[in-house]
Image (cartoon, rainbow, N blue to C red):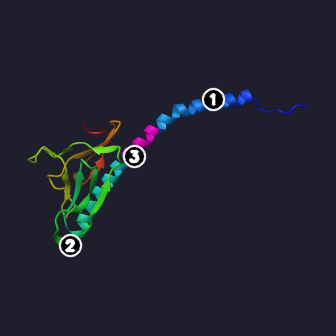
Amino acid sequence: MRRAAFTLIELMLVLAILAMMVALVAPTLARSSKARNLEQEAFRLVALTEHAREEAISQGVSMAIYVETQSGRYGMEPASSTGGVEKRKDFTMRDDLHFEELKTPPSTSTSSKKEGRVIVYDPEGVPDVSSIDYITITDQNGESKSIMRSADGYGYEVAKEAIK
């Protein structure tokens, strides 16, 4: 009496099908991971702007968000040394991400900023008029996410589409 079992050819055929499926899915998974990293960095920057706004209100001092485009560093610090507030936070982006040119509102005297303090919240939690309108983060594949001033003008949010 013979037992039911898989033949070697059937097993090899199943392994070949699995190998083809992995070969087709792997690039999509890699792109998805990179897109997720870009989105996470954008949300981390938005969270930092919200934190700076809350700190400005609770501490009663102006708080600034700074961006160093060349090094990929950004963070939050008191806008002035008065008040004795030492709440500095520093972040460094992943190596595959970088900042695009930073744009200031057209009402200010300069049309772009290379780096430095780009968003300043006053003690009431309102962004200064000289604060930038948006920041764009780009990955090495050219995909972008923009962080822009919210419609009410009091904060920043991740834009639905990247601003060019």
Residue 31 x, y percent position in the rendering: 43, 38
> Of the residues shown, which amino acid type is indicated by label 1?
Ala
Query: Dots 1 and 2: beta carbons under 8 Å?
Result: no
Tell me the residue that label 1 is attached to: 16
Indicate yes or no whether the magenta region holds residue 36: yes
Look at the numbered disc 2 and give the secondary structure of its residue.
Answer: helix
Q: How much space separates mark 1 and mark 2, taking CA atoms? A: 66 Å
Q: Of circles 1 and 2, which is in front?
A: 1
Q: Residue furthest bottom?
A: 84
Indicate yes or no whether the magenta region holds residue 69: no
User: Which circle's residue, 2 or 3, is located before the other in the chain?
Assistant: 3
Look at the numbered disc 3 and give the secondary structure of its residue.
Answer: helix
Tell me the residue that label 2 is attached to: 84
Q: Of circles 3 and 1, which is in front?
A: 1
Determine whether, in the image, residue 82 is placed left or right of residue 26: left
Magenta residues, as a range?
30-38
Determine whether, in the image, residue 84 is placed left or right of residue 89: left
Q: Main secondary structure of the magenta part?
A: helix
Q: How many C-alpha atoms fall within 10 Å of the one at disc 3: few (<14), some, or many (≥20)?
A: some
Q: Residue at x 28, y 49 (%)?
A: 72
Q: How much space separates mark 2 and mark 3, taking CA atoms? A: 35 Å
Q: Which mark is residue 37?
A: 3
Residue 3 placement: quadrant:
top right
Quick check: 21 above or below 145? above
Residue 139 x, y percent position in the rendering: 34, 41
> Of the residues shown, which amino acid type is indicated by label 3?
Asn
Q: How many C-alpha atoms fall within 10 Å of the one at disc 2: few (<14), some, or many (≥20)?
A: few
